[in-house]
């Protein structure tokens, strides 16, 4: 059997460092301190566990790297394994095309009993790991199934973004937010839906706190929190929502809707400054008055080994002919 090349992408330990050395005020609540220190230990133990598993695999050569040290496109690997949470998997996705699959390992899953115990003290939720198919409990079995060809990756849609007809190099796996850099400043923009270069919706003029567009995979994140709806994870459609529209009037029904897989949204920006945030706050692209932004799902897919429950829910949606708008 040919040896497989694997990249092990790691969330750094210093995420959980405490005290003045990293610019954070010392924590005086002993319960919070123990909780955060435990999170650091659990994450470190998960990394060591995954490395121990890989050392036993004679058919695998592997290379570990902290996600903070990775900035170039990932090439010449057969598989990427991320150890952290959804954030680490999202960062990997920005450096991957559609040729290399990724497996997410949730290194620090939320413990329901812990959340309930500290509910009156602080938020004890840990990593959600929505897209992560493995934890330390099943990592070796999932990896063996992948290496044996018994598991195949799913193809998740991403968002392609062009500014003034220039394609951005980063595709969004979860969502994008177009907004003024100051959250208290009104964003002014207009948009319409297009198909084959022709308009297929009215022009919508907006004053609001921004515009969010999500993939199916990202529809359970900020979009759902803002009042959107969860989509079947393998859907190729996009969902959009105007955030906090000011006096939308007759266009209220167009503040939230779908961009079908054969459509795109073209937006024009009319504020002095703006930013396109891609999958959170760390990746962003500046825009200015008069810029046009076009978004669609016509982007290279990302191959991801998904948790079985997500595939089951997606199948139920498809078999039940789920109508989400």
Image: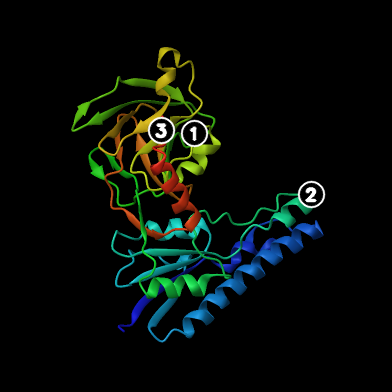
Q: Residue at x 54, y 70 (%)?
A: 138
From this view, report whether residue 180 is shown above or below residue 317.
above
On the question of residue 27 being in view, the answer is no
Q: CA distance from mark 2 to mark 3?
A: 41 Å
Residue 2, given in percent of the width and then of the height, sits at 30, 83
- Quadrant position of residue 184: top right
- Camera-near label (2 vs 3) is 3
First along the sequence among labels 2 and 3: 2
| 147 versus 193 height, above or below | below
Is 172 left, or right, of 36 in this rendering? Answer: left
Label 3 neighbour load within 10 Å: few <14, some 14-19, many 20+: few
| Residue at the image point whose x is 44% and y is 31% from the top | 241
Report the number of discs: 3
Secondary structure of residue under mark 2: loop
Which of the two labelled residues, at mark 1 and mark 3, occupies the earlier sequence position?
A: 1
Residue 165 falls in image quadrant: top left
Q: CA distance from mark 1 to mark 3?
A: 14 Å
- For discs 1 and 3, the disc positioned in front in the rendered view: 3
In this image, 143 relative to 165: left or right?
A: right
Residue 104: give its label: none
First in residue order: circle 2 vs circle 1: 2
Tell me the residue that label 3 is attached to. 323
CA distance separating discs 2 and 1:
30 Å
Between residue 24 and residue 124, name the one nearer to us.
Answer: 124
Question: Which residue in the protein does label 1 denote?
Answer: 228
Q: Nearer the viewer, mark 2 or mark 1?
A: 1
Q: Residue at 64% across / 69% down in the picture?
A: 42
Frontmost residue, 87 versus 320 = 320
Q: Position of residue 185 (x, y in %)?
A: 50, 28
Q: Which residue is mark 2?
A: 121
Taking the image as shown, residue 21 lies to the left or right of residue 162, namely: right
Residue nearest the viewer, comparing 305 with 302: 305
């Amino acid at each position: 059997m040919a040896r497989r090349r694997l990249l092990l992408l790691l969330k750094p330990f210093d995420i959980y460092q405490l005290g003045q050395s990293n610019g954070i005020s010392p924590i005086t609540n002993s319960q919070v301190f123990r909780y955060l220190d435990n999170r650091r230990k659990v994450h470190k133990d998960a990394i060591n566990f995954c490395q121990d598993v890989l050392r036993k695999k004679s058919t695998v050569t592997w290379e570990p790297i902290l996600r903070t040290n990775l900035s170039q496109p990932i090439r010449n690997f057969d598989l990427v394994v991320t150890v952290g949470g959804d954030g680490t998997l999202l960062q990997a996705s920005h450096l991957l095309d559609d040729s290399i699959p990724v497996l997410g390992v949730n290194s620090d899953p939320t413990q329901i009993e812990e959340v309930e115990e500290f509910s009156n003290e602080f938020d004890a939720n840990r990593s959600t790991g929505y897209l992560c198919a493995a934890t330390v409990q099943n990592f070796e079995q999932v990896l063996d199934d992948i290496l044996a060809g018994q598991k195949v990756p799913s193809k998740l849609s991403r968002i392609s973004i062009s500014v003034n007809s220039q394609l951005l190099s980063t595709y969004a796996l979860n969502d994008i937010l177009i907004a003024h850099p100051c959250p208290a400043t009104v964003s002014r923009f207009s948009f319409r839906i297009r198909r084959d270069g022709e308009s297929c919706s009215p022009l919508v003029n907006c004053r609001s706190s921004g515009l969010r567009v999500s993939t199916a995979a990202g529809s359970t994140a900020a979009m759902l929190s803002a009042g959107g709806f969860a989509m079947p994870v393998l859907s190729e459609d996009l969902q959009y929502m105007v955030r906090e529209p000011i006096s939308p009037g007759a266009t209220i029904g167009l503040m939230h809707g779908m961009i079908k897989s054969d459509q795109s949204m073209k937006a024009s920006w009319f504020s002095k400054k703006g930013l396109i945030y891609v999958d959170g706050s760390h990746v962003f692209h500046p825009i200015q008055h008069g810029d046009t932004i076009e978004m669609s799902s016509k982007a290279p897919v990302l191959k991801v080994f998904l948790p079985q429950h997500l595939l089951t829910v997606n199948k139920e949606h498809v078999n039940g002919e789920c109508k989400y708008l």
